[in-house]
Each structure stands twice: as structure tokens, then as C-alpha cells.
Amino acid sequence: MELTGKKDGFGYLIKWIIRLGDLLVINFTLILLSKLLFADDAFTSFINNVRLVEKLLLINLVYFVVASIIPINLSSNIIFFDKIVHRSFSFISLYFILLTAAMLLLGIDRITWIDWSVYYIGLSIIYIIWHITVRIILKWYRSKGYNYKRIVIIGSGNRATDVFNELKSSDYGYKILGAFDEIPDLSNPSINYLGTLSQVEKYCIENKVDEIYCTLPNSEESVILRLVNFSERNMIRFFLVPEFYEYIKRKLVLNSLQSIPVIGIRPEPLQLLYNRVLKRIFDIVFSSIVLISVFPVIYIIFGVIIKLTSRGSIVFKQRRTGLQGEEFTCYKFRTMYVNDKSDSLTTQQVDPRITPIGKFMRRTSIDELPQFFNVLIGNMSVVGPRPHMIKQTSLYNGLIDKFMIRHIVKPGITGWAQISGYRGETKTIKQMEGRFRRDVWYIENWSFMLDIKIIVVTTLQLLRGDKNVY
């Protein structure tokens, strides 16, 4: 049987060139910083120590561990700057977490956290520059007609047009040869008509097609099955665009029950065990640092002021809605006079219940610090949708369609909605819907670096002050 020729070997070579470049960047940055910034100190001794071989082996071994978790992808995200930066920061952050843990476990002498932080920042910058450069070179190389994948589309109509436009507008390294169907699609003359469905196999073999995108309806089951079998026999990747795509235009997730394909209607990165573990480790480390370093001082200072200016406890406890709709006890510094409406009435811009010191604490979010105990316990996360009072949850669930979706992840101290202008009181249903949409976006697009971004932006907003918080 005649087989389709492939060009995957070149892509494989590019990936290894990138890996070798990564290793050079990691080692070069370490040596460069030690020479430029840390002469005659702990960082230099880290390099010059007799255990240098062990360290270099560890530094490079950890890279391959991380590379197996976050692999190189040449088919997408070629020139999307934000995605390159995001992936690079994720890679380097995980690399440093594992490298630090390995050094501590193996008893390899340590350098100071300041020096280690400089290496982290320096390596991140150089690593990002390196990967942006690679993508620019690869894009230029593909513009010359090299290292692309030949694509054909099967079918016509809206779905075929959408697939064509999506592939054409992206920079995935695709060359769209045209489309097959029983009759030409006159509605989109930009798609080259290649012939009828009976001519697909011959054309694909003669033109060394790499991928087929099939948009045929389910009624063409026999044709689809024929093309699937042909593709697998000839090492052509086959992609089927489902009919329901036209009324569910959103990111979907394909899973399987043994041999039965199952399509999820919403991507949930935190359903992956690795992501949940990474987020939980960060929550524990971050909340522990806050509770050990900042919280004791804040508790003493503001605890005394709270007790002197109003009667009642220092810490206020309130039942709120958490993961999977379960109730939990949320902790805050008390910012109001003791009243019987704290569980039913939300804070207003002019609220006589708020104490003088409470206004300052709420404006600076100091009142939220005890929630790091919630994070440490495990019923909250540092970043996530903000938890509502039980009565609020019941109210909004009746007013906003699918409102409970925001509870499929742990609530957070800060979140994507809060840094997007939805911090503080939501006076209208429209505002609440806006917050809800951003909470759902966070759930569907979660990443470790997104959490870091939210924390950084939250900190900057707190320093500038937010008029919506009272």
C-alpha cells in the first residue's frame, strides 16, 4: 500500500534544538550571574564548590523532568506573545520549585533566597527572550514555505468556513490546500475546491497531506468511517468537527470512557491532579508565609484597636458558600459594630455598622487576612471566586442562570473578577452577572501564572487604593 510521506522528522529536530537551547540558557545564566553579580560570595561558592558536578547534573536533570510535564508545542502559540510569556513563566516557576526541593532533600549546600530570587528573575527574562526569538525565526522559516502541515477540509457550509477561517487566521504552521465535497461551496470562493468525496484518498497521497478536518454531517457516517480508516492507514491525522459545534461555540473537552468518546462542555484545568496539587502547594506555602510573617504583627496592632473601640470579638466568623456549594466558616477581622444583620445585609457605601478603624481595614483589605487560615485549612484558596454569604448565594442562584458553576472550585481571597473592576459591592444584577462571567472565565482558563498575575495586580491595586471598596 502506498503511504503518505511525512515531514515530522524536521519538527522533531527543532524540538531538540529548542531543548538544547534551554539547557544552554539555564547553565549560561547561572554562570553569568555568578560572575557578574555574586563574586566572592555564597553564589560563587555554589558554582566553585567541589560538588559542582552534582549540582550541574541536578540542574539539568530537573529540566528534563519539567520538560516532560510541560512539553514543547510547535503547532500552536507560535507568535502569541502573552502565551509564550505565560508558558515560559510556568515552566521556570515549576523548574525552580522542583530544583529547590531536590537541593534541600539531597542536602546540597544552599545559597541565600535573595541570590536564588535573582537567578529566578534573570533566568525567566533570558528564557522568555530565547523562546520569543525561536518563534520569530520559526515563523519566518514557515513564511518561506518550510515546516508547515498540509491541510484539507472535508465538507462545506458554515462549519467548513469556520474551520478554514480559524486555521487561516492563526499562525499554526498550516497550509490549507482546499476542500472536498460533492459540489463546490460557492458561498466562500476563497476555499479552493479540490473535488468530490471519492477523490479524497488519491489527492491526499499524491500531495502528502498531513491532516484532514472533516465537517460532514452524521448522516454521512459511511464516508466519515471510510476517511478515518484511510487516514489511520496512511498516518494522516484526522479531526472531526461535530455537528453540535454550531450551537455550542465554546471550548470543549474530549475525554473517553474506555472506547466511548465523551465531550465535556467546559474546560476545567483544575480537574487535572497535577494542577490541583500545584495550586494546593502554593496555597500552603503562601498562606504559611503570610501567617508567620505578617499576621502576628497585624493581629496585635489591630486586635488591640478593635477591642478598644468597640465591643465584641477581634475575629468575625460567618458561614459562606464554598466548594461544591458546601457551607464553611469564613474568618475576618471584625470591622462592624455587633449587629443582627451581618448575615443578611451586604455592606453599603454609607454603612453605620462599620467602625472607624473598620473603614480603614476594609479599604486596605486588612480585614481579609484571617482568611489565610481558611486557605491553610483547605476550604479556601488564595485565588478563586469570592465566597458569598449563604443568603446571597440563594438569591443570586435564583436570578442568574447557572450561577452555581462558580462553586466548582474553591473560593478565594482575591480573584479575576476582583482585579477586573468587580471588587466590592455589586449594586445591580448586571454587575453581578459581570462578576459571575469573570469567575467562570477564571475556572475555564486557570493556570498557575494566572494566579500569580492576580496576586500581583491585587497587591498593586491595594497600594493605589480602590474607591469601590468600603
Image (cartoon, grey):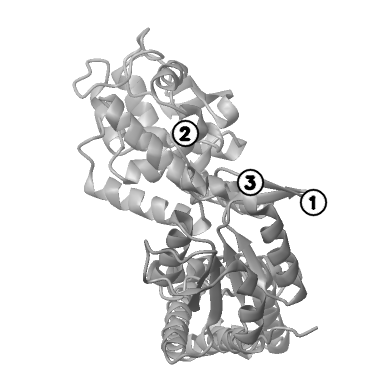
> Callout 2: few (<14), some (14-19), or many (20+) C-alpha neighbours within 10 Å?
many
Q: What residue type is labelled 3?
A: Ile
Crowd rating for badge 1 (residues with CA inside 10 Å; few <14, some 14–19, many 20+): few
In this rendering, is residue 197 above or below 387? below
- Where on the picture, by quarter, is residue 409? top right
Q: Which mark is on residue 401?
A: none
> Element type at marker 1?
loop
- Element type where label 2 sits in the image: loop
Q: Mark 2 points at which residue?
A: 370
Instruction: From the viewer's side, name the closer residue of 256 and 300.
Output: 256
- Whether residue 159 is visible, yes or no, is yes
Q: Residue at x 72, y 76 (%)?
A: 235
The amino acid pointed to by label 1 is: Ser
Image position, residue 150 (x, y; %): 55, 79
Instruction: Tell me which residue sits at (53%, 61%) in the image.
Output: 155
Q: Which residue is drawn at 29% across and 20% down?
A: 309
Q: Which of marks 3 and 2 is nearer the N terminus?
A: 3
Residue carrying label 1: 259
Question: Does 65 sit above or below residue 314?
Answer: below
Quadrant assignment, res 67: bottom right
User: Dot 3 lies on which element?
Assistant: strand
Answer yes or no: is residue 110 visible.
no
- Mark 3 near mark 2, Cβ–Cβ under 8 Å? no
Front-lying residue, 249 or 431: 249
- Type of amino acid under label 2: Pro
Sequence-first disc among 1 and 2 = 1
In which quadrant is the C terminus drawn?
top left
> Is residue 406 or residue 104 the one in the foreground?
406
Q: Distance between the residues labelled 3 and 1?
A: 13 Å
Q: Which residue position holds label 3? A: 263
Q: Which residue of the protein is positioned furthest toward the top in this rendering?
A: 340
